[in-house]
Image: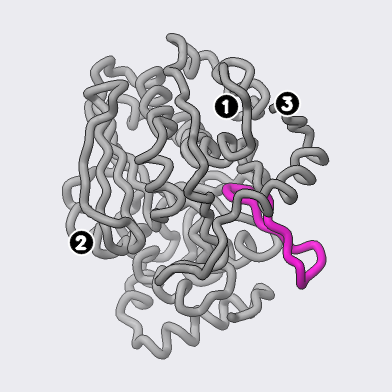
Amino acid sequence: MDIDLSKEKSETLGVEYGKMIREEGDLIQNEYLGTFRWKQGIKFPVLLPPNSNFYKELTLSTEKWTTFISNRVTFELEPFFLDAMSFPLTVISGLNTIFEKQSSFLKEKILNIVIIGASARAEERIALETNYFDEIYFYIKERSENNDIIVNIFFSGDEITSTNTYTSKNSKNLIYNFIPGNTGDYLKKYALDFSKTNVIFAGLNTGFGAGYKKLTISWIVDLCKILKFNFVTIFSYTNDYEDKVGELGIFEKLLDAKFLHKKEENEFKAMTTYKSEEKENQWSCANYGLYIIQGSNNKNIINDIMKMDKKLLEEKVLKTLTDVGIEIK
């Protein structure tokens, strides 16, 4: 399939394609409207490992989908491949910026990448049915100062179906770990095993800024813990009129987070675009943009929020969202 990846053409095709591949039926427990999901009948093509030095020579901050495809894709291209590849490549795009700012990560013998808020129908399915997340290992290995670096990729989230661990077929130094539960539970169990230079967190399309009260409140204390531990964390969002506005509002106005980077439009955003049938000019696209945080400018704020009465916390969080123009759902 020949896909025109120009901005205008890709967005038009993305809307039409979203109608074709969306899994029909009711949302499952703990799932929200924005949860990315493909029909079960879709079969993802195998991506061959990159040639040596591919990621060492590729300048991810300026390259687009077309460059990646021309170098790596040897099969008939389908939009759902771009959707699935968007997840690991978005993480890689964030890593590229982090490594430029903090090269100490590249000196480690073991590097842990933790995907928080992972979805069973998105990140978990990609990891179990494809080899696309292996790209994170290939990228890190090319950049690392240690030829034998071990990369652990953790998928943590309430939707993860079961605890599981396996080693990639492409390298014994890449281990996948699936851990059900929320981010707070994960941090309680594993945070002390990590240092500031051997772990990077990533939350992809988390949706906590979109105004869903239950979802947002469930994230706040966990976000505080990530900031308190001073872990570098990549976040992606699905649109610039709601998710981005709400998320940045939470981090800037409520938590006073330190930002390492903001990217208005991610070059590796997904192809599929969902357009609202009720509200004009409202749409969503997985991994549309991203930003990176580390720590807070005011630790007292973080401590106070973590100790706050549940009702008072809810009022404070919802006021933050409404102040930046987000409708509470």
Drawn side of residue 171 relative to residue 302, left or right = left
| Residue drawn at 58 percent across, 80 percent down | 329
Q: Are marks 2 and 1 in contact (CB under 8 Å)?
A: no
Q: CA distance from mark 2 to mark 1?
A: 34 Å
Q: Is residue 278 magenta?
A: yes
Q: Nearer the viewer, residue 97 or 164?
A: 164
98 left or right of 196 in image:
right
Q: Nearer the viewer, residue 146 or 42?
A: 42
Q: What residue is drawn where x is 68% and y is 75%?
A: 325
Point out the tag, 1 or 3, that comes first from the N-terminus. Answer: 3
List the residue tagged with mark 1.
60
Q: Which mark is residue 2?
A: 3
- Badge 1: how crowded within 10 Å, few (<14), some, or many (20+)? many
Q: Which residues are magenta?
A: 273-289
Report the residue marked by disc 2: 188
Could you say whether the residue bearing mark 1 is in a helix, strand or loop?
loop
